[in-house]
Image: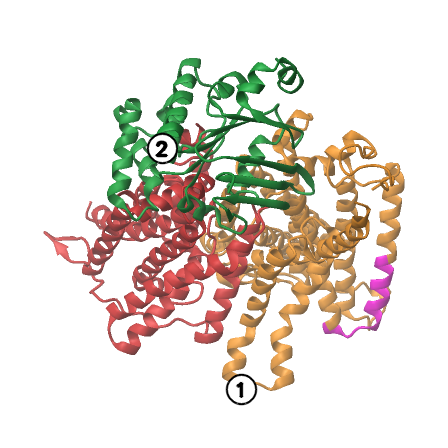
C-alpha cells in the first residue's frame, strides 16, 4: 500500500510534466494543424540554455526565465523561418520538416556541448518527504506540480478572458473568417508556436532533474509519452491534454514501479494503440463540434 | 468620384484558368447592388477578389477612390469594408457573444464597439437570448443574423454579402432584406449583395449586375431588370 | 501531353487525354506496354546494373566493397520505404525497428544452426527468408493498426515502435542479450572462388543480389494494378473506395511489403558485420532512412538508390573531414557523428522547403516550367 501511494504521488508529479508537454503539442495542433515532432528537441535545446544560464549566474530562477524566453524565441523562429514555407500539398510535409529539425537541433547541441550528460541541479530537494510513515512527494515534486498548475491556469485565462486569446482561438478555428474580421492570422500563428515552445521549455526544465539528465536525446522518449498523453486527451482539447498527461503519468508510474523501468516504452505503445484504436478522437475530443 | 466602390476590368481566377474576365461596374454610395447570375458565374469569386482573399490577375478595385491592390485582407475592415462570406462564416466553436466581440476587436474605440454590440442584440433579439450558445448550436437564420450583426459591429461603409438568403425561410429572408434597405437609407451603407434568389434581391436592390461565365453581361437599374420582360428572360431565366 | 492545336483556346476545349480512366489515376504511366515487356525491361535493367556493380567490385579495396554492400543493404530498405511513404502516403518512423527485427531474426536463426553444429551454404538464404517473413509479419501487425490511423497519428505510433528496440532487447535479455547484442558466424566466400577471394567482395555480391531482387520486384509492383491502387488511396481515399479499391487492404499490404523489404535489408546489414546490437538501430536510423527517401524524391525507386548512396557516403563525411583538416581532437570528437546528423537534418528541411519532389522531382518541374514558358506566347 505504501508503495502504491508512493508510485501515485510520483506518477502525478511526472504526469504534470507530461501534461505541460502535451499542452504544448495541443497548442500547436490547434493553431496550425501540425503535430510538432520537434517539440522534444526544442525543449532540450531550451533546457541547455536554461541550465547554462543557471550555472553561469548561479541562480536556477534566472535560468528558468532564460529557458522560457528561449522557448518563445525558438518557437517564433521555427514558425517564421521554416513552417510558414512548408508546402501543404502533402500533409506529411510538416512532419518531415519537424523531424529534420530534430536531427539538426540534436546535432548542434552535440557539437556545441558534447554528447555526454551535463549537470542540471534541481532547485529543491528531490528526496521524498515522509508523511505519517509514508514516502510521499518531494519538495521538487511539489514545485513541479505547482509550476504546471500555474501555467495551466494562466493559459486558460489567456485563452478565455483576453482579446488576444479570443483572436488566437478564432484564427485557429476559422482563419479566413478571422482575417475578414481584422485578425492578423499569421501573427497569431507565430504567437501560438512561441507560446507552445515556451510551455515546452518549462516542461523541459522541470523534467531534466528527475533522473533524466541533460543530454541531446533526453526528450526522445518524453516526446513519445507526451504525444501519447495528447492523444489520450484528444489533440484538440487543452483540458484533455492536462488530464491525459496526469493519467499517462500515473499509469507509467505503476508500470515502472511494479514491472520495471524497461517495460515503459512497451507500455507507452500499448496505451497509445489502445486509445487510437478504441477512441481515435481521444477521451475529451470536441470532434462533434467540428463536424457542424 | 462616381461611387464608393469601383471595379475596373478585374480578372481573377484559381490557377491558370480565369474565372473573372474584365469585370467592370460601380456601386454608388448608399445604394444596394445585387450581383445576379447562375451557379459558376463567378459571383463568389468576385466577392473574394474584392475583399482581397483572392489576388486579381489584372484590373483595379477602388474604394472611396483609394486603390485596394496590395492592401492586406485583415486591414480592409479598418477601411470600412466588411465581407460576410458564403456559408455565413460564423465561428462554430465560439459563442455568440465571442463571435460578436471578435467583430469589434480591431477597433480602438472600445466603448463604441460595445455600443455596436448592444445594437446588434437589439436588432436581433434572438441572438440576445442565445448569447452563451456556441455557433454550432444556432439555426441557419440565427447564424445569418450573427454573421450580419458581427459585420455591422465594424460600422462598415461597404458591406459585401454572399448569399444571405441561402437556406433561409422566405420570411427571414424578407426581414434581412428589409434591414439592409433600412441601413442603406438611414446610415448611407453601401451594399454589394450576391444572390441566387433573384426576386428577393431585386426587390431591395437599386442596381442589378448580371454575370455569366465570369463576365458582366449587363448592369442596369433593378427596376428595369424587374420590369423589362426581355432583359429578365434573356439573363435571369424567369 | 498532346500538343494543343494553334486554333484551340486554352483549357476549355482542349482534346481530352489518352482516356478518362488514365487521368483518374495520377502518375499512371502514359504509355505502358503489355505487362510482360515491362518485366523484361526491368529485368534487363537489373542484369545490366548488376553486371556493372560486380565489375566495379572487382576493382575496389575491401573497405570500399563494404561500402557498396552497405549501400545495397540500405537500398533494400529505402526502396520499400519510399513505396510506403511516397506512393501510399503512410509515414512510418518505425522502419529502423523493422530493420532491427530482420537483423535479429538472421542472428537468431544462424546461431540456432551454429549451436547445433549444422553448417551449409543454404543457411544464409534461409535466415534472410526468415528475416523477411518475420518482418512482414511485424509489418502486418503494425499495418493493421496503421490502416485505421492517419498522418501524424501513424507517425506517432511508429515513432513509439522505434523507441522499443533497446527496451525489447533488455526485457528479453535471455534471447537478445541486452545492450551487448548477438554475434553469429561470419559469412565467408565459397571455395570455388579461390582461396584469396576478398571476403568483402563476396558480401557486396550478396547485398547486391538482395537489392536487385528487391528493386526488381518493387519496380514491377509499382507498375502493376496494385501500384495504381496505392497511389489512388494516397490521393483520395473516398474516390479510391468508389472506384472499387479495398482501401484498408491496400494500406495493410503496402505496409507488409515495405516491412518485408526493411527486414531483408536489416538482415543483410547484420550479415555484413556478423553482429547485431540495439545500438545499431537507434531512433535516428529511422530519420536517416526518411532523409534518404526524401532527398531522392518520395515514391521514386531511382530516388531510393540515390538516397541509399548518400546515406552511406554522408556517414563517412566527419571522419573524412577530421582526416583531411587534422582538427583538434576535442572538436573532432564532437563533430564525429554529429556532423552527419546535422547534414541529414538540413537536407530534410531544405529539400522539403525548396524541392518537395526531391532531386528527381525538381528536375522534372524545371523541365515542365521551361515547356510552359515556351508555350505561353500563344495567348
Q: Is residue A258 above or below residue B216?
A: below
Chain identifier for the orange-coloured part of the image: C
Labels 1, 2: one chain: no
Task: Name the colour assigned to chain B in the rendering.
Answer: green
Measuring 39% from the left and 57% from the top, which residue is drawn there?
A194
Look at the image and say whether residue B53 sits in the magenta stretch.
no
Give the residue at mark 2.
B187
| x and y, in percent, of residue A121 in the image | 28, 70
In the drawing, what numbered circle is on residue C328? 1
Q: Element at badge 1?
A: loop
| x and y, in percent, of residue B45 in the image | 58, 35
Where does the magenta region start and end?
C49-63
Name the one closer to the observer, C371 or C35.
Answer: C371
Q: Quadrant of residue C277?
A: bottom right
Q: Looking at the image, can residue A16 be seen?
A: yes
Name the one closer to the observer, B165 or A263.
Answer: B165
Chain identifier for the red-coloured part of the image: A
Name the one closer to the observer, A210 or B103.
Answer: B103
Chain under numbered label 1: C
Amino acid at each position: 500500500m505504501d508503495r502504491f501511494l508512493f508510485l501515485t504521488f510520483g506518477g502525478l508529479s511526472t504526469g504534470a510534466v507530461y501534461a505541460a508537454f502535451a499542452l504544448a503539442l495541443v497548442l500547436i495542433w490547434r493553431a496550425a494543424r501540425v503535430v510538432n515532432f520537434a517539440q522534444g528537441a526544442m525543449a532540450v535545446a531550451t533546457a541547455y540554455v536554461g541550465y547554462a544560464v543557471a550555472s553561469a549566474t548561479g541562480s536556477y530562477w534566472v535560468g528558468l526565465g532564460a529557458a522560457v524566453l528561449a522557448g518563445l524565441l525558438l518557437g517564433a523562429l521555427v514558425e517564421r523561418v521554416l513552417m510558414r514555407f512548408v508546402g501543404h500539398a502533402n500533409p506529411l510535409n510538416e512532419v518531415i520538416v519537424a523531424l529534420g529539425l530534430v536531427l539538426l537541433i540534436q546535432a548542434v547541441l552535440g557539437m556545441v556541448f558534447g554528447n555526454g550528460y551535463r549537470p542540471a541541479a534541481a532547485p529543491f530537494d528531490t528526496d521524498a518527504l515522509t508523511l505519517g510513515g509514508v514516502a510521499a512527494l518531494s519538495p521538487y515534486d511539489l514545485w513541479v506540480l505547482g509550476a504546471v498548475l500555474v501555467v495551466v491556469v494562466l493559459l486558460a485565462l489567456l485563452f478565455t478572458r483576453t482579446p488576444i486569446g479570443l483572436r488566437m482561438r478564432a484564427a485557429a478555428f476559422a482563419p479566413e473568417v478571422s482575417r475578414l474580421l481584422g485578425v492578423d492570422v499569421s501573427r497569431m500563428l507565430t504567437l501560438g508556436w512561441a507560446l507552445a515552445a515556451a510551455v515546452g521549455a518549462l516542461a523541459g526544465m522541470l523534467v531534466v532533474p528527475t533522473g533524466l539528465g541533460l543530454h541531446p536525446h533526453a526528450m526522445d522518449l518524453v516526446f513519445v509519452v507526451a504525444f501519447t498523453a495528447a492523444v489520450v486527451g484528444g489533440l484538440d482539447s487543452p483540458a484533455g491534454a492536462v488530464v491525459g498527461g496526469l493519467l499517462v503519468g500515473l499509469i507509467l508510474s505503476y508500470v515502472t514501479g511494479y514491472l520495471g523501468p524497461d517495460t515503459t516504452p512497451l507500455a507507452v505503445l500499448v496505451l497509445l494503440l489502445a486509445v487510437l484504436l478504441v477512441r481515435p478522437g481521444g477521451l475529451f475530443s470536441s470532434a462533434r463540434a467540428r463536424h457542424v | 468620384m462616381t461611387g464608393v466602390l469601383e471595379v475596373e476590368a478585374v480578372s481573377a481566377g484559381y490557377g491558370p484558368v480565369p474565372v473573372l474576365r474584365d469585370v467592370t461596374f460601380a456601386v454608388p454610395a448608399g445604394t444596394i447592388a445585387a450581383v445576379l447570375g447562375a451557379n459558376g458565374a463567378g459571383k463568389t469569386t468576385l466577392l473574394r477578389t474584392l475583399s482581397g482573399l483572392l489576388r486579381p490577375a489584372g484590373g483595379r478595385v477602388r474604394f472611396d477612390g483609394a486603390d485596394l491592390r496590395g492592401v492586406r485582407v485583415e486591414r480592409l475592415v479598418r477601411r470600412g469594408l466588411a465581407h460576410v462570406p458564403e456559408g455565413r462564416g460564423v465561428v462554430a466553436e465560439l459563442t455568440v457573444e465571442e463571435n460578436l466581440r471578435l467583430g469589434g476587436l480591431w477597433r480602438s474605440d472600445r466603448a463604441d464597439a460595445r455600443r455596436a454590440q448592444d445594437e446588434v442584440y437589439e436588432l436581433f433579439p434572438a441572438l440576445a437570448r442565445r448569447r452563451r450558445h456556441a455557433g454550432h448550436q444556432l439555426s441557419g437564420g440565427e447564424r445569418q443574423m450573427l454573421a450580419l450583426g458581427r459585420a455591422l459591429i465594424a460600422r462598415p461603409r461597404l458591406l459585401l454579402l454572399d448569399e444571405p438568403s441561402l437556406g433561409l425561410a422566405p420570411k427571414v429572408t424578407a426581414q434581412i432584406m428589409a434591414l439592409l434597405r433600412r441601413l442603406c437609407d438611414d446610415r448611407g451603407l453601401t451594399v454589394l449583395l450576391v444572390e441566387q434568389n433573384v426576386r428577393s434581391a431585386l426587390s431591395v436592390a437599386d442596381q442589378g449586375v448580371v454575370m455569366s461565365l465570369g463576365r458582366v453581361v449587363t448592369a442596369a437599374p433593378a427596376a428595369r431588370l424587374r420590369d423589362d420582360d426581355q432583359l429578365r428572360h434573356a439573363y435571369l431565366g424567369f | 501531353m498532346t500538343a494543343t492545336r494553334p486554333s484551340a483556346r486554352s483549357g476549355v476545349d482542349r482534346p481530352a487525354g489518352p482516356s478518362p480512366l488514365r487521368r483518374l489515376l495520377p502518375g499512371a504511366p502514359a504509355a505502358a506496354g503489355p505487362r510482360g515487356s515491362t518485366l523484361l525491361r526491368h529485368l534487363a535493367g537489373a542484369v545490366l546494373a548488376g553486371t556493372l556493380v560486380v565489375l566495379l567490385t572487382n576493382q575496389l579495396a575491401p573497405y570500399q566493397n563494404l561500402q557498396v554492400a552497405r549501400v545495397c543493404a540500405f537500398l533494400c530498405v529505402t526502396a520499400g520505404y519510399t513505396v510506403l511513404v511516397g506512393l501510399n502516403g503512410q509515414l512510418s518512423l518505425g522502419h529502423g525497428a523493422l530493420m532491427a527485427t530482420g537483423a535479429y531474426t538472421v542472428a537468431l536463426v544462424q546461431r540456432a544452426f551454429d549451436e547445433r553444429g549444422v553448417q551449409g551454404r543454404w543457411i544464409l538464404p534461409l535466415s534472410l527468408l526468415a528475416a523477411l517473413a518475420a518482418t512482414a509479419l511485424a509489418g502486418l501487425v503494425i499495418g493493421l493498426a496503421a490502416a485505421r490511423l492517419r498522418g501524424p497519428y501513424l507517425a506517432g505510433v511508429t515513432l513509439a515502435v522505434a523507441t522499443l528496440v533497446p527496451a525489447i532487447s533488455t526485457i528479453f535479455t535471455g534471447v537478445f542479450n541486452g545492450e551487448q547484442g548477438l554475434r553469429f558466424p561470419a559469412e565467408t566466400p565459397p571455395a570455388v572462388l579461390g582461396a584469396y577471394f576478398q571476403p568483402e567482395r563476396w558480401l557486396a555480391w550478396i547485398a547486391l543480389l538482395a537489392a536487385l531482387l528487391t528493386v526488381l520486384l518493387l519496380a514491377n509492383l509499382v507498375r502493376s494494378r496494385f501500384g495504381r491502387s496505392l497511389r489512388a488511396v494516397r490521393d483520395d481515399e473516398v474516390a479510391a473506395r468508389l472506384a472499387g479499391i479495398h482501401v484498408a487492404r491496400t494500406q495493410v499490404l503496402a505496409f507488409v511489403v515495405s516491412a518485408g523489404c526493411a527486414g531483408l535489408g536489416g538482415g543483410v546489414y547484420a550479415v555484413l558485420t556478423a553482429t547485431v546490437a540495439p545500438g545499431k538501430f537507434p531512433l535516428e536510423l529511422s530519420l536517416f532512412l526518411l532523409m534518404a527517401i526524401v532527398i531522392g524524391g518520395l515514391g521514386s525507386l531511382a530516388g531510393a538508390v540515390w538516397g541509399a548512396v548518400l546515406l552511406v557516403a554522408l556517414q563517412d563525411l566527419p571522419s573524412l573531414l577530421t582526416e583531411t583538416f587534422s582538427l583538434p581532437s576535442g572538436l573532432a570528437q564532437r563533430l564525429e557523428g554529429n556532423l552527419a546528423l546535422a547534414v541529414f537534418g538540413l537536407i530534410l528541411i531544405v529539400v522539403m522547403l525548396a524541392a518537395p519532389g526531391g532531386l528527381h522531382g525538381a528536375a522534372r518541374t524545371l523541365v515542365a516550367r521551361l515547356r510552359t514558358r515556351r508555350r505561353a506566347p500563344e495567348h
